[in-house]
Amino acid sequence: VMIPPALPQKAPLQIEVTTPLCGVPTPLCVPTESQVPTPLCGEAFRQWLVGQGPLQRNGPDHISPPRVGLQNQGNTCYLNAVLQCLIHTPLLRGNLELAYERPWLGEDEQPWLVELLRLFREVDEAKGVGRPVSAASIAELILANKEFKRGQQADAHEAFMFIVARLLDACLALGDSSGRRPAGSPGDGYAAKEKLERESLVGYSFGMDVGQRVRCGSCSYASTTSQVGYCLCL
């Protein structure tokens, strides 16, 4: 799968990462008491989730369903359905908002993260005036890939998995703030990359362990394997 090219220049979205999106977080700076960043991965993120109480998987209390429509970009109902599900995933929305608080990166660096956050914010702004929102920028990103053709319907689950893969790539490309190379660098093994994926924001929002156990009917020898899978549970 080829990463789509950058979109045409538009007004920049002013955001900054204050917490890592994968791996074990280490301080990027010394925050003030009024600006303590929320970790998005590793043991610190797990402890933060535990501290949220029984509704920890619902994200911050102020994240409420916006109930805002998305304009169709030409048989993009499948994409709008997936985006509405992401919009209504408080854990993803809330922590992505916490991670990006001040100017930080340009659209040509991590367009999927930038455009998804832009959509979240436009939806929040629109819910008070009752107008639909255009997801044209994200539609352009996904339609730049041969799996999804302009003007044709596509499978919503395939679109979800494609978007998850792009978000994972973006999270891992940013590194884990520990000074290590981004996942996927030459010399990194599959196990190291999978560990970072498990610890990423996407892993905590949608990740699950898929196990398989096979037993021989003759000698009763059993082998067990597991891998990371991603599922959208509303």
Image: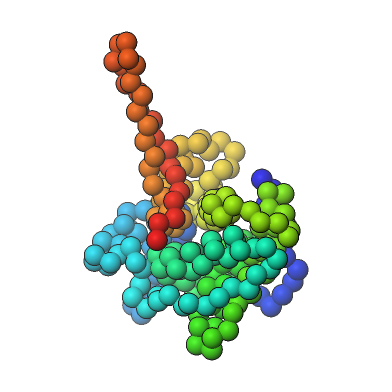
Q: Is residue 11 left or right of residue 78?
A: right
Residue that extends furthest to the bottom in the rendered view of this protein:
129
- Residue 221 is situated, as x and y percent measured from the top left of the image, at 31, 16
Q: Nearer the viewer, residue 193 or 80?
A: 80
- Residue 199 is situated, as x and y percent measured from the top left of the image, at 41, 51
Q: Nearer the viewer, residue 191 or 149?
A: 149
Tell me what residue is drawn at x 49 percent, y 42 percent.
193
Is residue 28 shown to the viewer in this render? no
Q: Nearer the viewer, residue 198 or 222?
A: 222
Tell me what residue is drawn at x 68 percent, y 53 percent.
148
- Dividing the picture into quadrants, the one containing residue 32 is bottom left
Tell me what residue is drawn at x 49 percent, y 74 percent.
101
Is residue 78 shown to the viewer in this render? yes
Residue that extends furthest to the top in the rendered view of this protein:
218
227 up-or-down from 178: above or below: above
- Residue 224 is situated, as x and y percent measured from the top left of the image, at 35, 28
- Residue 137 is situated, as x and y percent measured from the top left of the image, at 67, 68
Q: Is residue 203 left or right of residue 45?
A: right
56 up-or-down from 186: above or below: below
- Dividing the picture into quadrants, the one containing residue 83 is bottom right
Q: Nearer the viewer, residue 161 or 40?
A: 161
Instruction: Say which quadrant the C terminus sits in.
Output: bottom left
Tell me what residue is drawn at x 59 percent, y 52 percent.
155
Instruction: Say which quadrant the N terminus sits in.
Output: top right
54 up-or-down from 148: above or below: below
- Dividing the picture into quadrants, the one containing residue 56 is bottom left
